[in-house]
Image (spheres, grey):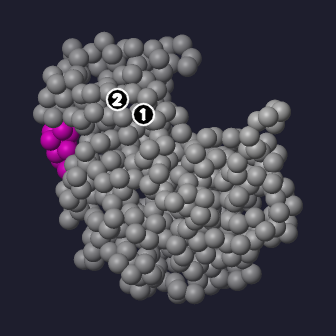
Amino acid sequence: MTPGAAPAGPVVIGVDLGTTNTKAVAFRTDGTLEASHAAGYPLDEPHPGQAVQDPQLILAAVLESVREVVRQVGAQRVAGLSFSSAMHSLIGLSPTGEPLTEVVTWADTRSRVQAERLRASVGGLALHRRTGTPVHPMSPLPKLVWFREQEPKLCESIGFWVGIKEFVLLRICGALVVDHSIASATGLMNMSTLAWDEEALALAGIQPEQLPEIVPTTTVLPALTDDAAAAMGLPGTTPVVVGAADGPLANLGVGAVRPGVAACSIGTSGALRVAVDRPAVDPLGGVFCYALTSTRWVVGGAINNGGVVLGWAGDAIAPDLAEPPEEELLALAARVAPGSGGLLMLPYLLSERAPHWSSLPRGAYVGLTRAHRREHLVRAALEGVCLQLALVLHSMRSAGLDVTHVRATGGVMRSPLWRQLLADTFGMPIEFAHGQEGSGFGAALLGMEALGLIESIDVVADMVEIEETVRPQPAAAAVYASLLPVFAELYDALVPAFTSLRRLAP
């Protein structure tokens, strides 16, 4: 500290357990970022349909990332830790808490058949509307049905079923708990009662005693284990806030916590979510509903195919472009007028989630003519991603949600073309927040509220600085408004073809 400078204030470290890395971020109570560190780990795909991880590597990444941030800010300034985590993970533990399975992630599709069977059953939609979680291979419920049917001997030895955040908290605090937010994304918790749903547990073939205790997201665990405290360089009395799921916390991180303000993120995949004060799912089950706190929920949908579609276009359509090809691909797409000359792309390269929640779909170009060139194919791919998010927005409105503002983040949103496309396909202005740390910032804010350092997480709405607002161009918005119903109808029209193609070319 320089002579005469004010003493540095306390920080809360948000710890965000992501799909490929854990990032720890230290924030002051005014939202100032003090330090950050990320530690990565692989997402293993040893066989088709599998997407798994080693829980011990993730635990090691947590310890490393926190230890490095503590080194930067000083242990005496750390008021507490607060956690964010990717949703839908599943780990089987022994009765003594040792992992008997790998981390089965949201991207694992082995339970495709089980999910489709549950979704098509008489009570499938009711299950979705009761738990808020779409019946989809991403969800722990179909995963548990898969384990029961495919690994019955293993299931007999499982003492507890948990997600990755619950495993980490068990290791660093000795507590077996799950927050309302993560629990609401399992397909196993009843949104009305905030308790495990008896029918869902019966379908999964498990007992309530095999699941962690459900607690509020602001629950404070009062101490670290001796080993964890030593590994992170913190006092054993450092409080740990259980925290929430990364999707709801991403809304918090961009200040999208007030009614009508949605958060849209497009990275490799994408999502659109809005905060509400009571749970809601549309009549057709097109959206999810996950908790942020016990009185605040996030409704929306995730798509599998975001920036990954542009990467595919570079490999498949324009492999001759310089590395990295993103800027040249975007320049190609910018040459073409909105609507790509009547060409539509269904961008389902990695199947799809919202609003159809099916593992069936494949990508498709429709409307291709001899006049189309690769710039049309590239632009149609980008338009397909934004049109898919526009379908999610339509489903949110069908659930009775009034979306009046959208705040967007994510890697691809650095591009002016992507920004304008999103505004045009949504037909509304899109706000872009000055670089916050998303879910990690949200976790830190939730931790500040839990520890009494801020009055309420609502303060974030005034903390987040909007650096740019992109407004729709009327002519382009009119084109996309005309194309959206055609785009929506194509999914239903192609379901028989998707079904046949999966059988013919698994």
Tell me the kind of residue under disc 2.
Answer: Thr
Q: Residues within 10 Å of mark 1 (few under 14, many from 20)?
A: some
- Viewer-closest of 8 and 166: 8
Residue 452 drawn above or below residue 194? above
In the image, is 336 to the left or to the right of 133?
left
Q: Which residues are magenta?
A: 484-496
Q: Does residue 148 appear anywhere in the picture? A: yes
Of helix, strand and loop, which one carries label 2? strand
Percent x, y for residue 40?
Answer: 69, 45
Q: Which circle marks residue 466 in the picture? A: 1
Q: Based on the picture, tell me whether residue 485 belongs to the magenta stretch.
A: yes
Q: Nearer the viewer, residue 104 or 439?
A: 439
The residue nearer to you, when weighing 295 against 212, is 295
Which secondary structure, mark 1? strand
Residue that appears at 57% across and 17% down: 323
Please say whether residue 361 is one of the residues in the magenta stretch.
no
Cβ–Cβ below 8 Å for labels 2 and 1? yes
Residue 200 placement: quadrant: bottom left
Left or right? Give the position of 381 relative to 47: left
Percent of width and height locating residue 284: 21, 62
The residue shown at (46%, 35%) is: 465
The residue at which mark 2 appears reads as 469
Q: Which mark is residue 46?
A: none
- Amino acid type, residue under disc 1 in the picture: Ile
Q: Give the residue displayed 37% in from the left and 14% down from the top.
A: 332
